[in-house]
Image (spheres, grey):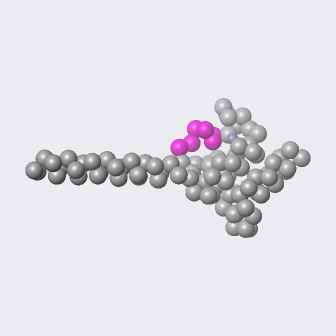
Amino acid sequence: MKDKVIEEIESRIEALQKDIEELKEIESPEEKLATDLHTVMCKTNHSDGCSWFYEDSCEKYAHKRYLDMAKKILSTGISPKKSIEIAEIINNG
Ligand SMILES: [Zn+2]
């Protein structure tokens, strides 16, 4: 009886841990836009010019820089899609 209860609790813990991992992987709108802006705008070398792919958090330099830009853009009311279109125009212009 006791073993069965423990087994059920462990199974629920496992399911909750899976939910936590899935939630951690979901980007906020700001983080998503920051990633898209970096993809469109960054022209620097990723072996020594930009640390984007070497960073493990949004608080690190390159991610923070694009995250700050994304927050400012979103605060103007421009949609993420429009802001990427504008970034592409500026970048290719
Ligand atoms: Zn970069």
- Give residue 31's quadrant in the image: bottom right
Residue that appears at 74% across and 55% down = 81
Residue that appears at 29% across and 51% down = 13
- Give residue 72's quadrant in the image: bottom right
Give the total of numbered labels: 0
Let me know if residue 85 is in the magenta part.
Answer: no
Magenta part of the chain: 51-56
| Whole-percent x, y for residue 61 in the image | 62, 48
Residue that appears at 61% across and 38% down = 53
Q: Quadrant of ligand 1?
A: top right
Q: Which residue sits furthest left?
A: 1
Left or right? Give the position of 57 relative to 35: left
User: Which one is in front, 62 or 11?
Assistant: 11
Q: Which residue sits furthest top?
A: 47
Left or right? Give the position of 87 relative to 1: right
Position of 47 relative to 27 (above/below): above
Residue that appears at 62% across and 58% down = 29
User: Is any atom of residue 52 visible in this view?
Assistant: yes
| Whole-percent x, y for residue 55 in the image | 57, 42
| Whole-percent x, y for residue 59 in the image | 56, 52
User: Is any atom of residue 59 visible in this view?
Assistant: no
Left or right? Give the position of 36 relative to 90: left
| Whole-percent x, y for residue 79 in the image | 73, 61
